[in-house]
Image: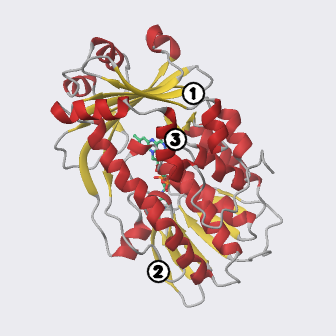
Amino acid sequence: MNASSKSGSGKSGSGFKMIVAGGGIGGLSAALGLANKGCTVTVLEQAAQFGEIGAGIQIGPNAFHAMDYLGVGQAGRDKAVYIDKLVMMDATTGGMVAQMPVDEPFRQRFGNPYAVIHRADLHGVLHDACMAHPAITLVNTQRVMGYENTGSGARVATESGQVFEGDGIIGCDGVRSKIREQLTGGDELRLSGHVAYRAVLPIEQMPEDMRWNAATLWAGPKCHMVHYPLQGWKTFNLVATFQTDVSDVGTNEPGTREEILSRFPNVVDRVRKVLETPTEWRRWVLGDREPIENWTDGSVTLLGDAAHPTHQYFAQGACMALEDSVCLADKIEHCGGDLHRAFQEYQAERIVRAYRVVLSSRMLGKVYHAQGVERLIRNSVMGAKTPGQFYDGLEWLYGGTGLNSGLVQTETAA
Ligand SMILES: Cc1cc2nc3c(=O)[nH]c(=O)nc-3n(C[C@H](O)[C@H](O)[C@H](O)COP(=O)(O)OP(=O)(O)OC[C@H]3O[C@@H](n4cnc5c(N)ncnc54)[C@H](O)[C@@H]3O)c2cc1C
């Protein structure tokens, strides 16, 4: 076990002692939000080290609003690459379907940028802030197995046989959450048949005529490929997704060039050329879960993918986890010492917004993978949209963090 603890911690403000299960983007942002409100927080992470996979992530203005609230907005902005637009290309013809600028007028409208960032950088910003916070303790190699409400709070047991007790438990243990499993009685992972391959290419391996300052999506029949620059333009992030009839569950397994190429049979040469380039692909079988109307059991609640796992098509899963953390922190600050009330208000406020993302992501998967006449309709409808029409349609998402109280202040505006 490796526990990184800082001196000077103690109860103040709301004064709750909180246990966070899982140290991903959701768990670390939750810890930060709670500690900023006066809680003392212990984060239990199953892995031997806190970290993230080597891949990119897109983050919308709503994520930056949330990071501002958590006090890490500028640190995140310093690591990001600022793309000019989101582009959809038709992978069967090579023609452009639509583009949405995310340049200055977009940033003005939504108060923060749309950006891409390496996951390790985003996670690192949160990790640094947690390490620097005197009220947060990060503990590795602790796989949470289950929880128990005690009447005065709750406790979790870990695989190593240890028990951690607090006033409240936040399950941030991802799509295969043990906390959720117990809380729901074990709801099924919904296997979509979608498989994602990921790779990061050194910039010089990306064809020069495709080094666009954009998050670009090549939409093909039952498949699509996404690419964007990362790490100060040193690398390009690639994600190639296809539909198949997999029934297994896989995470971060080695993938093969043969499989990926066989799933993109009818795409233009420039897409194939990119898919042929990586020497190493990692493979994920994607799943989400049906929405549920309750995330809370007494002194235990869920956050991030544990609460609302989603497909990546809206590029919002991590953004939602960051938003959850803001909302939870806000509710705890204003609950008058009643943690159960805070959890109930938190889930009531988050459920509609987070599941709107989950269901919209499923729908977007169909749009991206359209074929035949559906593809023609998609191209016609999306191609006719003006930037203003795109922005109006996204106001609900990017216009805030989803906090009804609207209290979010950005670091830059403050
Ligand atoms: C291909 C792909 C692309 C994506 N692109 C985007 C994007 O562009 N933008 C975006 O916002 N989102 C994106 N997402 C979604 C995003 O990655 C997730 O929503 C986000 O990482 C969820 O964070 P989390 O902390 O809730 O869960 P996780 O990242 O899964 O973290 C869970 C943590 O808990 C730990 N853990 C698990 N079980 C236990 C246990 N029992 N005990 C203790 N610790 C445990 C894990 O080791 C991990 O550290 C994408 C997802 C995929 C698959």
Q: In which quarter of the image is the N terminus?
A: bottom right
Q: Which mark is residue 83?
A: 1
Relative to 394, is 368 above or below?
A: above
Q: Please name the residue that numbered disc 3 is placed on.
A: 391
Q: How is the image coloured?
A: secondary structure
Query: Is 245 on the left or on the right of 203, as rendered?
Result: left
Count of marks placed on residues: 3
Q: Are marks 3 and 1 in contact (CB under 8 Å)?
A: no
Instruction: Report the residue that reaches farthest toward the top.
Output: 208
- Visible in this render: residue 363? yes
Q: Which mark is residue 297?
A: 2
Q: What element carries label 2?
A: loop
Query: Is 406 on the left or on the right of 96, as rendered?
Result: right
Pointer 3 or 2: first along the chain:
2
Q: Is mark 3 on a helix, strand or loop?
A: helix
| Residue at figure coordinates x 58%, y 54% from the top left | 322
Label 1: few (<14), some (14–19) or many (≥20) C-alpha neighbours in 10 Å: many
Q: Which of 100 and 71 is in front in this view?
A: 100
Q: Is mark 1 on a helix, strand or loop?
A: loop
Amino acid found under the numbered disc labelled 2:
Asp
Pointer 1 or 2: first along the chain:
1
Relative to 147, is 367 above or below?
A: above
| Residue at figure coordinates x 79%, y 75% from the top left | 13
Q: Residue 161 location in percent, x, y?
A: 49, 71
C-alpha gap between disc 3 and disc 2: 38 Å
Q: Nearer the viewer, residue 312 or 10?
A: 312
Q: Are marks 3 and 2 in contact (CB under 8 Å)?
A: no
- Visible in this render: residue 159? no
Pointer 3 or 1: first along the chain:
1
C-alpha gap between disc 3 and disc 1: 16 Å
Instruction: Report the residue that reaches farthest toward the right.
Output: 8
- Camera-side mark, 3 or 2: 3
